[in-house]
Amino acid sequence: MSGAILVLEDGRTFRGEAYGAMGTTLGEAVFATGMTGYQETLTDPSYAAQIVVMTAPHIGNTGVNGEDDESRRIWVAGFVVRDPARRPANWRATGSLDGELAAQGVVGISGIDTRALTRHLRDRGAMRAGISTELTGEELLARVQSAEGMTGADLAPAVTTTEPYVVPAVGERRFTVAALDLGIKTATPRHLAALGVETHVLPATATAEDLLAAGPDGVFVSNGPGDPAAADYAVAAVRGVLDARRPLFGICFGNQILGRALGLGTYKLRFGHRGLNQPVLDRVSGTVRVTSHNHGFAVDAPLDRPTDTPYGPVEVSHVGLNDDVVEGLRLLDAPAFSVQFHPESAAGPHDAAPLFGRFVDLMASARSGDAVSPPPVVGHSTAEKEA
């Protein structure tokens, strides 16, 4: 087995064994706390340009399969594990994790102290890093320190679909949604399809006119990678949708884009939220949900009062209980809301799945001509009960 080295931009170095492809890779080192769901993590476009450190020590036990991918390929820049499985042991497995990493050219490292690495990133923040099977530590450090960081990175156009496509509803089509693909996961239109929604997925640079051209009942703004401050095209598209007063729902990167469209700021978190066990308070219903997260940026908005915007007042609807980070927004006089976490739960808990039903209820109210009101927050939606 060949050796590998991981070097952080501050010079901290870890030596281990090659895991996946041979070569050199650069990216932002971050840690993910999920004990399972590594295949969904690897294929989540939101992880583009990031070297992901798994905090769970034993990774690869269930191998990989053709059903759990969340996009067309692996997007992580590199992968770090402590104790890789010797061989997959699951009836669904069609291959090994290290074999799939090698096949897709993803450079990784195993056999290092991921607990020490995670503590370092937690204390000093996510930072640029590199993994190599061919360079010395000094050579790799020089490359890392000359690499671009995540701040200012515009990555959505690199991960989005190149052509529009349609995901049909399951059974009767009740609504049509236009989805702005900033790095969408396959689970999202699948959740909508189960509620009778046909989803038209459009590239990241689609304009408001593109999104509204077919007269959709609502617009969805997806998760994705990069700095929201660099995605002015998406902000402009969302403003156009808000001007048209079409129901809108955003998640993760979409939450940040909605925030910027409303005139709020965004900022980079010290080490971000990545994992399947993040507690979030729904401040309107008073309920707490355990949620799936993957974000390094957040919306800057006051927690103690609504904020006036060109589209009416907006309030912080959800708050992270670990650090009081804004985890959701909702407009009080317009049909739009968003959350920072991943309600499609791929992988992760299903606590937040009812949010898709809230979106369907919002579209139903708009179609019937009811007065616009904030999306419901308590109990199960009508759409969920009928699905």
Image: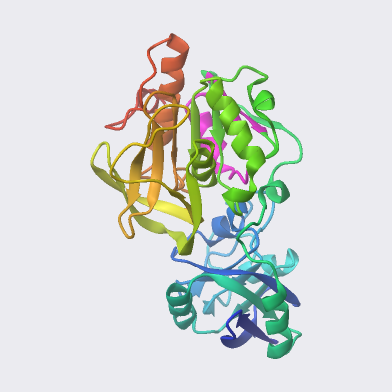
- Is residue 177 highlighted in magenta? yes
Is residue 33 visible in the rendered image? The answer is yes
Q: Does 278 sit left or right of 131 as displayed? A: left
Please identify the quarter of the rendering in which residue 105 is found. bottom right
Is residue 169 visible in the rendered image? The answer is no
Extreme residue toward the left, this view:
286
Q: Does 45 sit left or right of 334 as displayed? A: right
Q: Nearer the viewer, residue 256 or 262?
A: 262
Quadrant containing the C terminus is: top left
Q: Nearer the viewer, residue 260 or 5?
A: 260
Q: Residue at x 64, y 57 (%)?
A: 152
Q: Does 73 sit left or right of 241 as displayed? A: right
Please identify the quarter of the rendering in which residue 214 is found. top right
Q: Residue at x 67, y 85 (%)?
A: 4
The x and y percentages for residue 299 are 45, 48
Please identify the quarter of the rendering in which residue 25 is found. bottom right
* 370 w.r.t. 253: above or below: above
Tell me, what colour scheme is on the image? Answer: rainbow
Total marks drawn? Answer: 0
Span of residues in magenta: 175-201
Q: Residue at x 68, y 73 (%)?
A: 20
- Is residue 76 highlighted in magenta? no
The x and y percentages for residue 335 are 44, 24
The x and y percentages for residue 341 are 44, 48
Quadrant containing the N terminus is: bottom right
Q: Nearer the viewer, residue 21 or 29?
A: 29
* 164 w.r.t. 99: above or below: above
The x and y percentages for residue 270 are 46, 66
* 39 w.r.t. 201: above or below: below
